[in-house]
Image (cartoon, helix red, strand yellow):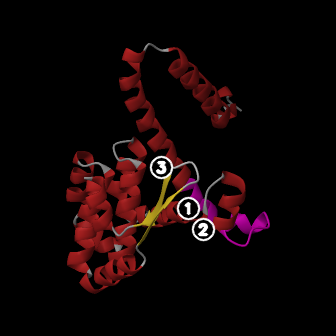
Amino acid sequence: MCEASRVDPMAMLAAAADAVVAFFAEAPPAALGEAMIDCRRQMDRLEAGFTQAVGRFAANREYAAEGAPTAVSWLKANCRLSAGAAAERLNIARQLDQLPDTGQAFTSGELGYQHAALIARVASQVGADTVREAEGDLLKMASDFDPNRFSLVTRRLRHVVDPDGALADANRAYEQRYLQVSPSLDGIILIDGRLDPEGGAMLQT
């Protein structure tokens, strides 16, 4: 067996993580910005690899061999993910299998995790075939827009292709809105709430 075949990629990743953490702790502030951009890109690449692994793990029902009833429950118990985060990664894996350009952009680090999740979500809503027709435009806009702005693009696509479904989702989000403002005993104001996308956008502007 050649030496390269005995390399443990997880050990290499742990060593690289140690080096990056040490760099961020010691680097001069002027060097942090560019390094953070590079780090985020590599983290997105790792998310892409992890998501692919999730898809293969689930498709082969490896979670059942370890006594878990579902892939989501296994991910919750072993990978420190919430049910929503686990389900999101499963959906990305399933949808990006049918969207090779998006999958390649995600794997290379050109596409961030949140952008990939938005594309996968709209693909699950309107079908991967429909998204594939607009894939080039979506990837271009994903590179230009932050996730909040890009979510408007994917919601618009959903509205055009599936107006009834989009309206049902919008009505459901509207009905689930709430906002609670209450003072604490020491005079601090506590705010808790849930807003629909339009209300959230107004609050953020």
Query: Where does the image place residue 156, in percent across and percent down from the top left?
Result: 22, 69
- The residue shown at (48%, 49%) is 48
- The residue shown at (24%, 76%) is 159
Q: Is residue 121 above or below residue 114?
A: below
Name the disc covering residue 55, or none: 1
Label 2: which residue? 59
Dot 1: within a 10 Å radius of its alpha carbon, few (fewer than 14), some, or many (20 or more) residues?
many
Q: Say left or right for 29 vs 166.
A: right
Q: Is residue 99 in view from this perspective?
A: no
Q: Is residue 107 in view from this perspective?
A: yes
| Residue type, numbered disc 1 | Gly
Q: Are marks 1 and 3 in contact (CB under 8 Å)?
A: no
Question: Toward which corner of the image does residue 11 lie, by quadrant?
Answer: top right
Q: Secondary structure at mark 2?
A: helix
Label 3: which residue? 48
Q: Are marks 2 and 3 in contact (CB under 8 Å)?
A: no
Label 1 or label 3, whichever comes before in sequence order: 3
Question: Toward which corner of the image does residue 76 lie, by quadrant?
Answer: bottom right
Query: Where does the image place residue 57, in percent across and percent down from the top left?
Result: 63, 61
Name the disc covering residue 144, or none: none
Q: Say left or right for 116 vs 78.
A: left
| Residue type, numbered disc 3 | Ala
Question: Toward which corner of the image does residue 175 lie, by quadrant?
Answer: bottom left
Q: Which residues are magenta?
A: 52-70
Q: Are marks 2 and 1 in contact (CB under 8 Å)?
A: yes
**Cα distance between the residues tagged 2 and 1:** 6 Å
Q: Secondary structure at mark 1?
A: helix
**Cα distance between the residues tagged 1 and 3:** 11 Å
Residue 114 lies in the magenta-colored region: no
